[in-house]
Image (cartoon, rainbow, N blue to C red):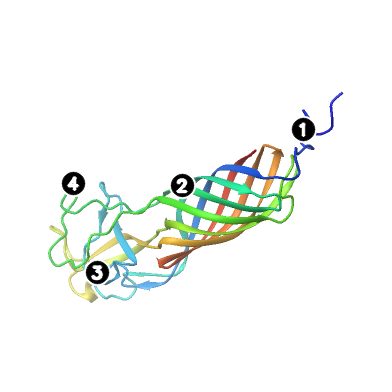
Amino acid sequence: MCTPGEGNDGPDTGGTTDGTQHLLSVGVQVDIAYVSSGENVCSGESSASYVCMLPDTDPSTQFFGVPAGLNGTNAINGGLAYGGTRVFVGYDYFFKFGLGLGARVGYAIGGPYPCTPGEEGCPAIPDGSGTPAANSFFPAHLEARASWKFLNPNPKGGDFAPHVFIGGGGAQVNSSVPVTVCDQLLGENEEASESCAEGGPAVERRVDAYQLAGLTFVTFGGGVSYMFHRHFGISGELKFMVLFPTVGFTISPTIAPVVAF
């Protein structure tokens, strides 16, 4: 004859109802970034906020042209854009009253990663460009957070456990938008484009303009965990990130299997 609560791993048992709880997670976060409207995004003076890349180049090549001041070119219309995906591992320590302290360490799949001008296979910066070489994307995600489970602070199998959180750390989010530029720094063996004639002799190019955001951030949001078993469940969050000193904002849904012990 067993004692209730012992030796039963079914969904209606939860072990202890007090004490602490360790939570390990491995998850995915998708960044949907707000891209603000901008003018002269591929000009040299915008290099701190934007990086423009030539599409379909190997190695990845930065645009070093001189855009003409022609209406309808070299500009971004504001809106939401895909800002990359990050994978992370997390650890949280929950006290019996639902307060949790934790951390996330991850890797972001984003860009750009421009090649170094002048290196093998990478064109040098042409004379007259005025655009400096850009730094590569910072792919690491480092986050500290505090959270609070306001229901079921020590959930059992079959329980939902909603939570809210705040935090901060280091990360970068860069969203790309296709942009047309009229390049006045004519390439070798290229003829001027009729569509760019109003700005003088120029070649029309399509580039990917990345709006840069980060390298630090604050975050807040909420989510819910569902425990299939007192030791295993799944967690989903709606996360908001405000990035600075280069300002940006993301809406970042996340999902992560969790292991509790």
Pointers 1 and 3 in contact (C-beta within 8 Å): no
Q: What element carries label 3?
A: helix
Q: Distance between the residues labelled 2 and 1?
A: 33 Å
Q: Name the residue under label 1.
A: 10
Quadrant (top left, top right, bottom left, bottom right) of the C terminus: top right
Labels 4 and 2: the sequence-earlier one: 2
The residue singled out by tag 2 in the image is 106
Q: In which quarter of the image is the N terminus?
A: top right
Of residues 13 and 256, the one drawn nearer to the viewer in this rendering? 13
What's the distance in space between the residues labelled 2 and 3, CA to CA? 32 Å
Query: Which percent across, then down, holds residue 198?
Result: 24, 76
What amino acid does circle 1 point to? Gly
Q: Badge 3: few (under 14), some or many (20 or more) residues near its Cα, within 10 Å?
A: some
Q: What element carries label 4?
A: loop
Q: Which amino acid does label 3 sit on?
A: Gly
Disc nearer the start of the sequence (2/3): 3
Specify the amino acid type for callout 2. Answer: Gly
Is the residue marked by circle 2 packed among few (<14), some (14-19), or many (20+) residues within 10 Å?
some
Disc 4 designates what residue? 121
Mark 4 and mark 1: span between their CA atoms?
60 Å
* Residue drawn 74% across the image and 41% down it: 156
Q: How crowded is mark 4: few (under 14 residues within 10 Å), some or many (20 or more)?
A: few
Which mark is drawn over residue 44? 3
Local crowd at mark 1 within 10 Å, few (<14), some, or many (≥20)?
some
- Mark 4 or mark 1, which has the lower sequence index? 1
* Mark closest to the chain's N terminus, 4 or 3: 3
SS state under label 2:
strand
